[in-house]
Image: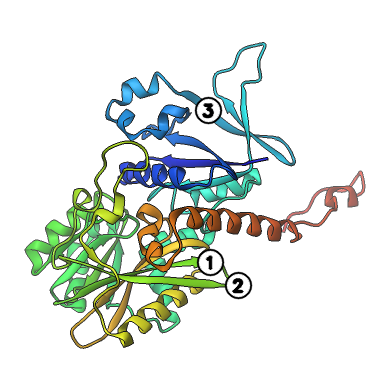
Amino acid sequence: MKTKVAVIFGGVSVEHEVSVISALQAMSAMDDSKYQAIPIYISKSKEWYTGDVLTDIDNYKDLDQLFKQVEKVVLEQENEDTIVLKKKERTLFSKGVITTIDVVFPVIHGTNGEDGSLQGYLELLGLPYVGCDVASSAAGMDKVMMKQILRDANVPIVDYEWFYASQWHQDQTAVKQLAESVGYPVIVKPANLGSSVGISKANNEEELEEAIELAVSYSFKVIIEKMVTDLTEVNCSVIGDYEEVESSLCEQVLSSDEILSYADKYQSGGKSGDTKGMESVNRIIPAEISDEATTKVKGLAEKTFRLLNASGVSRIDFLLNPEGEVFVNEINTIPGSLSFYLWEPTGKDFQQLTDQLIQLAIKRERERQSIQFSIDTNLFALHSKGGGAKGK
């Protein structure tokens, strides 16, 4: 019997289209002799849909027409061991069950998909799911939290400061002083977005003001980082869990003196499986860096993955300066195209990658079932009938 894998994608973030591309790639790569991929698309208005038409990227060019051909759905726990996908609108004579779900494969980038929100919902349902758990998703998504964890473990990161948007609105002078303490030029980023959304360079106070105004329109928390000049941008993917990790080849992203836009990073076209995704970016694989730098990057990638207790596949991005220093920039816990293009040159094709990710999800769920989360007792029954409950 095939394992029924619900691939959830779309979502409310600014990386909505990126998610669609990555999900269609993953579904087309799954071994259909072992898995039945069930597409679940979440619209920007937070409605959940399913239907075979969701697997053809051409259908997303006309969303109004697409929504007429799909079914609104919800996930429900039918009993302790069974989760079903149901029609949201049901009749008196039908429960509206479409199928059972065995595993969830989240491919939602950004807000509500990569930040632990969806993962927490799936854990409440008791569904095994691919990728990082709630805590590691949240830590990986929040750049401030991530940097604090890495800094405390002596992982090299660039100098930075951070602030809340409310602080900017209340005292701009104090925030500008943070930038001065880091030292121009700086990079200003929303703390919890990706795909270069809301990111700007600032060489002076005037540019800083513009950069911050843009960043706070996307996030309530903002980071000011020291800009690495003459940098080489290198990425490395890691797959595994707390017990065993493996790092991919390194890639060198070209034109890193400019901030790549969403359009630069992603392109779509053709039928399912023909989408280009992140592999369309100008890159060199393997990266043209020294053996010593490659070893350092791979080691730091694996260390970052373990420190954040990541699981599944992630991509860790690095900045290298001309002096040979290597800095961890960020982790992407659901990377674009699932970083399959970094694994193919090593002999792990996309089908093997998706299979390994699903097996890691099933393994984690087995381990969770062996852990005791509660004590079977009833404290209320310990009180006498006449006694009053006392809180602490």
Question: What secondary structure is found at the residue carrying circle 2?
Answer: loop
Number of on-image labels: 3
Residue 133 shows up from this direction: no
Q: Residue at x 49, y 25 (%)?
A: 72
Instruction: State the residue position of label 2.
Output: 243
Mark sitting earlier along the chain (3/1): 3
199 horizontally vs 105: left or right: left
Residue 284 figure quarter: bottom left
Cα gap from disc 1 to disc 2, whole angstroms: 8 Å
What residue sits right under mark 1 in the picture?
240
Q: Residues within 10 Å of mark 2 (few under 14, many from 20)?
A: few
The quadrant of the image that shows the C terminus is bottom right
Of mark 3 and mark 2, the one earlier in the sequence is 3
Question: Hey, what amino acid is under mark 3?
Answer: Val
Between 162 and 285, the one lying in front of the other is 285
> Mark 3 highlights which residue?
73
Measure how far apart labels 3 and 2 are at the Cα level: 36 Å
Amino acid bearing label 2: Glu
Q: Is residue 322 left or right of residue 140?
A: left
Q: Nearer the viewer, residue 67 or 123?
A: 67
Mark 3 and mark 1: Cα distance apart in space: 32 Å
> How many other residues sit within 10 Å of disc 3, few (<14), some (14-19) or many (≥20)?
many
* Mark number displayed over residue 51: none
Q: Amino acid at mark 1?
A: Gly
| Residue 87, position as x, y percentages in the image | 56, 23
Query: Which percent across, then down, holds residue 278?
Result: 30, 54
Where is residue 105 drawn, in percent x and y? 52, 47
The image quarter in which residue 321 lies: bottom left
Residue, x 90% and y 52% (percent of image)?
382
Residue drawn at x 49%, y 74% is 307
**Cβ–Cβ below 8 Å for labels 1 and 2?**
yes
